[in-house]
Image (tube, grey):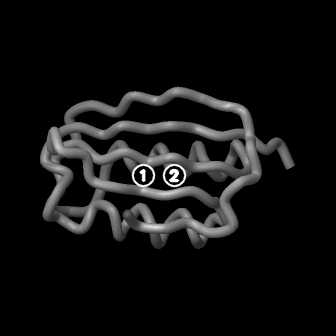
Amino acid sequence: MNAVGAQVVISGLVQGVGYRYSCYHLARQLGLTGWVKNRPDGSVEVLVEGDRGGIEILIDQLKVGPPSAVVKRVDISWTNFTGKYNDFDVG
């Protein structure tokens, strides 16, 4: 496994449309750990760790979002794997 981490900030119409929960379900299906939360500025932030291939699949889906979302921007910062998360949570 090529374990890495990523911090992803998604902007657009991404709050109140089921965005965090669609992210949560896919991250868990992919065996990834970390969290997803709404930010005060209306964006959504994801901190995720696991296999790089799984994270890339998640990011591809984050660029689309659930049907009601309108994703305008996705900023990705790759990080080192820390192993400090045991699960994937919604904040």
Q: Which residue is drawn at 71% across and 54% down?
A: 84
Q: Is residue 34 above or below residue 12?
A: below
Q: Where is residue 31 in the image (x, y as percent from the top left)?
A: 67, 66
Question: What is the quadrant of the C terminus in the image?
Answer: bottom left
The amino acid marked with disc number 1 is Gln
* Quadrant of the rendered image containing residue 81: top right
The Cα–Cα distance between marks 2 and 1, rounded to whole angstroms, is: 5 Å
The residue tagged 2 is 58
Residue 61's label in the rendered image is 1
Q: Is residue 34 left or right of residue 36?
A: right
Q: In this view, does 58 lie to the left or right of 72?
A: right
* Quadrant of the rendered image containing residue 74: top left
Q: Residue at x 27, y 31 (%)?
A: 73
Q: Which residue is drawn at 27% across and 53% down?
A: 38
Q: In this view, does 64 lie above or below 30?
A: above
Mark 1: few, some, or many residues within 10 Å (few <14, many ≥20)?
Answer: some
Q: Is residue 88 above or below residue 14?
A: below
Identify the element where label 2 is drawn.
helix
Q: Nearer the viewer, residue 20 or 62?
A: 20
Identify the element where label 1 is drawn.
helix
